[in-house]
Image (cartoon, grey):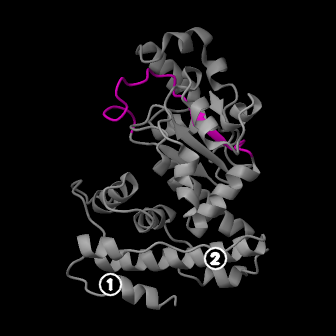
Amino acid sequence: MATAQELLAAGVDPKNIPTLTTELNKPKFGGLADTEFMAEVGRFGNTDPTLQLGLNWWWDTQGKGTQIFDTGERFADDPSKAGWPLRGAAFSTGDNINVGSNLADNWAQQTGYKDGRDWFNSMKDAGELRPEVVEKGFDEWEKGMLEIGDEKVMAMYAQAINPLQPETWSHELSHIGQYIIREAGLKAGISQKEFNASVVAGKNKEETQRVRDIMMSSSGDPAYENAHKWLQNNRRDDQDRPVPYTPEEIREIAERVLAEDQYSNRVLESQGGLAKSSGDLSQYESQYLPDEPGFWDSIKKLFD
């Protein structure tokens, strides 16, 4: 079980992104990182405000709240074609569903098991765990798992399809940024009354981030294509048929992204940072909303 903190403790320089990637590529860490992920996450300086908050958190905490989660299963020969669909997750302060639960328990509950021990024993009995994991036993596997609730936590799943993709880091770090807005807003002059009255409060953070993924990428990029598929297929009716998001719903979510980014900029500036630009939906409009002329321009005007 490798945390970003363990990489740092092993002498990896967090400011040397290629070195960090080289370390992640070593067999002892799964050999799964195939790009200079933090450089890609940072888009070589082209970050949106909310992602920038997440990146700042990563560097400020030196990665101690991030865990590369090894389920104990065998690694796929071709991780682009086999693996779990869940690539990553981010948890805010207070997300502890059960007292004492950690990432192992959370993983188990997401996959239909009672807790981490139930997952481990079931997978062991089914012969799904790697021999060295079985030999060390549950306690060693669970050792060092980050607890959920006291601090913000991010997990990257080693047995996912296309694990440790830069786009997954971007997505999950942006969720961390969303949490920071809510936690640091008062210090940035964002009153609770103002926030509660905003288009951001109480809304689905996942759908907001999916539209932001599109706004900050281009057609053909994994983030762009994954987000579009999510908008088309995530919601299901009572017969399990997809219920795609409508243009009006996408418009409302895009407005929410821009509002959220404005709050992120206020937090960044209150911390001595520079404001960042948001992405846009012009390419998505031309590709998927041809019957909605002026779609993106009409949204932008609300925030000019």
Q: Which residue is mark 1?
A: 295
Describe the element under mark 1 as helix, strand or loop.
Answer: helix
Q: Mark 2: which secondary structure? A: helix
Judging depth in this view, the residue of 268 and 137 nearest the camera is: 268
Residue at 42% x, 18% y is 128
| Residue extent of the magenta highlight | 62-84
Q: How many marks?
A: 2
Position above or below: 270 against 132: below
- Which quadrant of the view contains residue 142? top right
Residue identifier under label 2: 263
Query: In which quadrant will I find the N terminus?
Result: top right
The kind of secondary structure the magenta stretch mainly shows is loop
- Asked if the stretch drawn in magenta spans residue 154, the answer is no
Point 76% across, 76% down: residue: 188
Query: Could you tell me how far apart the alpha carbons at marks 2 and 1 are, in whole angstroms?
Result: 23 Å
Residue 43 vertical position relative to residue 255 in the rendered view, above or below = above
Q: Seen in the image, is 79 located left or right of residue 173? A: left
Magenta span has 83? yes
Dot 2 or dot 1: first in sequence order is 2
**Residue that appears at 66% across and 19% down:** 139
